Image (spheres, helix red, strand yellow):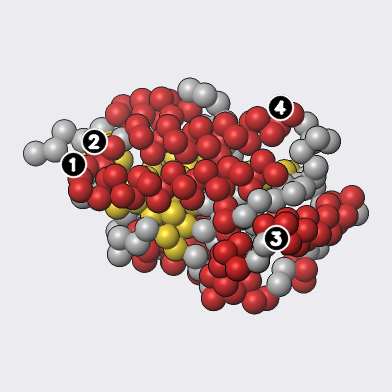
Amino acid sequence: MALYRPVTVLTGASSGIGRALAHVFAEHGHELALVARREPELATLADKIVAANRKRPVVLSIDLARSDAPARISHELIARGLEPAVLINNAGFGLVGAAATLDRAEQLAMIDLNVRALTDMSLRWIDSLTRHRGGILNVASVAGFMSGPHMAVYYATKAYVLSFSEALNRELKSRGVRVTVLAPGPVPTEFQARAGLGSKLPPILTCSAEQVARAGYRGLMGGKRLVVPGLGNKLVTFMPRLLPRGLMLRLVAANQMSRANARQEGWPRRRPEGTQP
């Protein structure tokens, strides 16, 4: 008899793609441990999952930007007699603007969350994931396939997530652990609506948070290495292979400059995960 009960750990669960992932995994019978900074939002999400006749998730109000966050999550799970069978690394954020003008500490914090915390979490419970023949779902972005002037650090962090996850997929396959990297494009969220940017999302590239979550779930359960939801976004990931790098840099720079201008008109500089790449 197993000493600890298996659970699906989901970070960044309070909104956007994370919230949609929580509903999809709960729908398929997963017991969840929801992790994010905002406890009220997590509690509301847990109530909605219970209202759908699913098991109440464990709520862990922990800031993943803190270096001790993964250890705290591990401690909280052990105290409840739980261990990860599935890990979903969704927490992250982006900053819009030229790297030289953005706050250096904030950019380093982005690396801590998008890269360091994700790596720590991915490696911390491999023995547990192996016991349960479970898996890891890491949320990247189509941004990971290219360089991103005016979001330089964000694009670079997602390139890391893509590379790291694909390599881990290969390494852990023999242990029965599935590793899938989910690379969505633009995803409309409440954040977009509040900023008045819903109409600015290109329809051919846009998927809903639920569509992204369901694609991620199917990909992980099917043992896929990479999931890119939407035909338009699949085509975007091929562009860096077809176009000269200099041209790609100019195209991305022009696109991000338009978003920087939107920010000056009222778009907050810091974007939560699951809005646009």
Q: CA distance from mark 3 to mark 1?
A: 44 Å
Residue most toward the right?
Answer: 265
Give the CA separation, mark 2 to mark 1: 6 Å
Q: Is residue 177 above or below residue 4?
A: below
Mark earlier in primary sequence (3, 1): 1
Q: Secondary structure at mark 1?
A: helix
Q: Which residue is mark 3?
A: 248
Q: Earlier in the sequence, mark 3 or mark 2?
A: 2
Going from N to C along the chain, the mark reached first, 4 or 1, is 4
* Residue neighbourhood size for the residue with mark 2, other residues' Cα within 10 Å, grouped as few (<14), some (14–19), many (≥20): some
Name the residue at 20% across, 45% down. Answer: 175
Q: Amino acid at mark 3?
A: Met
What residue would you read off at disc 2? 127
Q: Residue 252: x and y, percent? A: 73, 58
**Quadrant of the image occupied by residue 275:** bottom right
- Say how many tags the image has: 4
Instruction: Please tell me the numbered disc located at residue 105.
Output: 4
Q: Whole-Å distance between the Cαs marked 4 and 3?
A: 28 Å
Q: Which mark is drawn over residue 131?
A: 1
How many angstroms separate mark 2 from mark 4 (CA)? 34 Å
Disc nearest the viewer among 3 and 2: 3
Q: Nearer the viewer, residue 55 or 220?
A: 220
Determine whether the residue tagged by mark 3 lies in a helix, strand or loop: helix
Q: Which mark is residue 194?
A: none
Is label 2 in contact with label 1 (beta carbons under 8 Å)?
A: yes
Image position of 56 (left or right of 107):
left
**At 44% across and 54% down in the image, what residue appears?**
181
Residue closest to the eye, 160 or 111: 160
